[in-house]
Image (spheres, coloured by chain):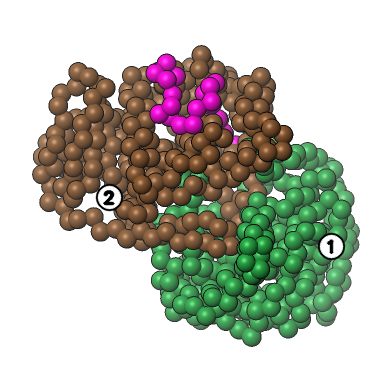
Chain colours: A brown, B green
Amino acid sequence: MRRTAARLADRREIIYFDRDDAPPRAGYDPRSLPPVRTSPQLRHDPLLDEWVAIATHRQTRTHLPAARECPLCPSRDGRQTEIPSDDYDVVVFENRFPALAAASGRCEVVCFASDHDASFATLPPQQARLVIEAWVDRTASLGALPQVEQVYCFENRGPEIGVTLHHPHGQIYAYPFVTPRTRQMLSVARGFRERSGGDLFGEVFAAERAGPRVVVSSAHWTAFVPAAARWPVEVHVFPHRRVPDLPALSCAERDDLAVIYLDVLGRLDRLYGVPLPYVAAWHQAPVRVDRELAWLHLQVFSVRRAPGRLKYLAGTEAGMGAFSNDVLPEEAARRLREAGG
Amino acid sequence: MRRTAARLADRREIIYFDRDDAPPRAGYDPRSLPPVRTSPQLRHDPLLDEWVAIATHRQTRTHLPAARECPLCPSRDGRQTEIPSDDYDVVVFENRFPALAAASGRCEVVCFASDHDASFATLPPQQARLVIEAWVDRTASLGALPQVEQVYCFENRGPEIGVTLHHPHGQIYAYPFVTPRTRQMLSVARGFRERSGGDLFGEVFAAERAGPRVVVSSAHWTAFVPAAARWPVEVHVFPHRRVPDLPALSCAERDDLAVIYLDVLGRLDRLYGVPLPYVAAWHQAPVRVDRELAWLHLQVFSVRRAPGRLKYLAGTEAGMGAFSNDVLPEEAARRLREAGG
């Protein structure tokens, strides 16, 4: 893997992750771009003790452009995109419309492939492996910034969940706080350890690994539908060995992840015979605290509850945080097992 | 107000809330309905220590029927609906497709008006007042059930958030647990009181009431956009006096609520010139615990961030619980102030 770092015309950072035999990547962005003027604010909600990012400049962000105007394709035939190179394998750059910036954190875009019509599920394993290497690199680099408390690698896929660019890409948020969900998971694990001396992640994962909802497993990873799944389609992928985050994975675990993750995504797309809208969320340990309590895992979930039906987060979920799921987790696991490629 | 309780053909409860001078309501449901066979389960998510309702029978629930097949209209011209009366003012009945039932709680439907094409915002104040009385009645009655820990009155409005029936209606969930959001708010308020001796709800509300984000206020209520609003449109409506729940409101406070709530909903619909999709969520104290910590309030929020644009809960919100809002709360408050009728 070869890493090439450069700057875009407005000083945003861009980093290419290429196969060793790839041609050199452009370092120069010939565009004339105004400086990024972002003023994202973090505001504290005192009643819930949570931080909310207020980022008004995002209202003007690029929204579902035609393929010939895609800002994530390589720069070719005289058209300059966000990536000033006529090809790339995997590339990461700072988002021009970040929800978090400067002291409030950082937002990056990860292009999974130069092919506009690809999707993560259809990448060759060596390409998925490059993406994993990019996630590892960004988790370590962003986690070293003084203002960052948690690094979150994720993919939003599909217009059904509001994706504004079709080009296969993910995002990385470097938060200046520990996110609410992570904070709660770690608080519950800490309480369990204090009360029982036990290891909550370890016990839950051991039970799921031996249980009826396993979808697929490999040498180093197991994918399962959790017993109390919140979403009609929800798969958790755990490494067999407790590690806090992606950089802590061994090379063998990373190689194996590329294979099992592609397997899981393929099952998701075969579930309804059409590309599944999903969120793929990497739950990593915070940068500074509670690293010994966490267990790295991937949560992939979808709002699709039937071919023509979506699940919406409305009154009970968005108002009270109480989820209702119309699909039995054991049935979802069975269908995903049968959707093997 | 006159209250008439009866049973539907499958033994579900139905309760009419009528003006004193309304004609008598039908007690007999002539339909031949199979018994409701529900098997909602509650499952505990051990990693987040939260309950999830699994209710698979809901997959077959009625989905956007034509107006002439609406199950929430009165029974007229030989067509039998869920309401076996040829008219009603406000009516509440047990949901045939509940997310919670029996030991796991209870779900009810509240029809706000017999007119299929009405909306809450266009109700006359005396009709809104009847709905408030229905909420009060159901909060007290459901809160008296031994398995119920929290009663939640809410309205999902608009197909953009997944509403499956257009007839103006809301819902009531009686949960057998304290919901995650309420639990967290009360935990934060308790921590604040233990650390400082202070009253968090009281301090936050006093600051908002004197601040730049007030939308409208009345003798007993103030509506404002919170400083750290999570949604592009979000209004909180607080009573000036601390009460734990709707039954604790005085008659004067209830009368006043009907007027200010209609005022707020009218502003929401004028914001973009088209009916706004929204969730209206009543935050009430739990039935048994922490009642002295809570402060009843209504939270109304929308996914609409611009005329043709919606906010989606994707990677950061649904994955990490960390919200990002593209609209400045002070600007939202200014626009809502200017949208007065």
Split into 4 quadrants, where in the image is the N terminus of chain B?
Answer: bottom right
Residue toward you, A117 or B257: B257
Q: Is residue B161 above or below residue B257?
A: above
Residue toward you, B12 or B330: B330
State the residue at coordinates (78%, 38%).
B39
- Report crowding for label 1: few under 14, some 14 to 19, many 20 or more residues within 10 A (C-alpha): few
Q: CA distance from mark 1 to mark 2?
A: 53 Å
Give the SS element for disc 1: helix
Place of residue B215 in the rendered image (x, y in percent of width and height, measured from the top left): 51, 77
Based on the picture, tell me whether residue A18 belongs to the magenta stretch: no
- How many dots with numbers? 2
Residue B141, label in figure: 1
Does residue B102 appear left or right of residue A230 in this picture? right
State the residue at coordinates (21%, 35%).
A5
State the residue at coordinates (27%, 50%).
A96
Point out the stretch of residues depicted in magenta.
A232-253
Place of residue B152 in the rendered image (x, y in percent of width and height, measured from the top left): 71, 59
Place of residue B328 in the rendered image (x, y in percent of width and height, measured from the top left): 41, 66
Give the SS element for disc 2: loop
Residue type (three-letter) at the residue carrying disc 1: Ser
Residue for badge 2: A96
Q: Is residue B49 above or below residue A204?
A: below
Do discs 1 and 2 share a chain?
A: no
Based on the picture, tell me whether residue A245 belongs to the magenta stretch: yes
Q: Nearer the viewer, mark 1 or mark 2?
A: 2
- Which of the 4 image quarters holds residue A131? top left
Does residue B304 appear left or right of residue B21 in this picture? left
The answer to whether one can see residue A225 in this image is yes
